[in-house]
Amino acid sequence: MKAEHTSSSSDPLRSLVATLGCSTVGYFPLLLGQFDAVVWMAWVAVISLPTGAYAGASGLRAWPFGLAIPGSWMVILAWLGGSSPSALPEPAWGAAAWTGLFVIGMAVGAAVRSNPWRCAGGSLALAALCSVLPVSGTPALGLYGGRSLGQVDPQFAAVAFDTSPITLVIESAGADWMRHRAVYEAAGTEWFSDRREPYRGKVAASLVLLLGYLGILLTRSRARAIWGSQ
């Protein structure tokens, strides 16, 4: 049992391959020709938790391999920053937010110790659901009878908007996500804009990072208690 759990983390080559594989997930929008920093950051917000869950369930160590994954996405952000049509006033806090989501995913994956793909799939379903709820009034989805969340319950709409990882990451970067066309045209955020305040990166991203690292410490402590040293 011990050998099974530590095999991936004790093999540097396997860890390197897993790190490179997880990192490339963040490049998919660029391969499709999407170079808008806000749109790309929305993609990273959705995949951060499941990618971290896969890494954690695979036994990948948080340092140095695990953190190299969200770190590689920061390189893309820096590259997009100079050419993107969308402005990001505080991109560093957006990067801190997705790193926090990634680390939370690693902690969950390490704690569950399930099949990495199953763990990533469950986390992706959760992240996607939380991301789509704020715009679920679109006719294509057919939810809520084609009405926006705000037309159903403004308070529920505000909570749904707050729980979206996209909201967390993009607002932490200083962008006005409530009035971005991808959200405003679909859900009409004026229905619930008075029920919430935008995330402030210094607070929100810091809290998410802290939660993630506390989770990593707890899972490592639990591993030592059961198997001895990792």
Image (cartoon, helix red, strand yellow):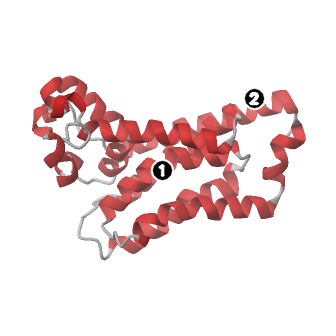
Residue at position x 84%, y 53% from top? 10
Q: Amino acid at mark 2?
A: Arg
For residue 139, above or below residue 83: above
Q: Amino acid at mark 1?
A: Ile
Residue at position x 24%, y 65% from top? 86
Residue 81 on image: x %, y %: 34, 70
Q: Which mark is residue 28?
A: none
Categorize mark 1 by other alpha carbons within 10 Å: few (<14), some (14-19), many (20+): many
Residue at position x 49%, y 42% from top? 124
Q: Assign a secondary structure to mark 2.
A: helix
Q: Assign a secondary structure to mark 1.
A: helix
Q: How many marks?
A: 2
Tell which of 69 and 152 is nearer to you.
152
Q: Which mark is residue 47?
A: 1
Q: Which mark is residue 222?
A: 2
Specify whether 173 is left or right of 208: left
Quarter residue 151 falls in: top left
Residue 207 on image: x %, y %: 45, 38
Tell which of 124 and 159 is nearer to you.
124
Dot 1 or dot 2, earlier in sequence = 1
Residue 167 on image: x %, y %: 32, 44
Residue 140 on image: x %, y %: 23, 44
Specify whether 148 is left or right of 19: left
Residue 207 visible in rendering: no
For residue 213, above or below residue 192: below
Residue 215 visible in rendering: yes
Tell which of 3 and 206 is nearer to you.
3
Q: Quadrant of the N terminus?
A: top right
Q: Nearer the viewer, mark 1 or mark 2?
A: 1
Q: CA distance from mark 1 to mark 2?
A: 26 Å
Quarter residue 2 falls in: top right
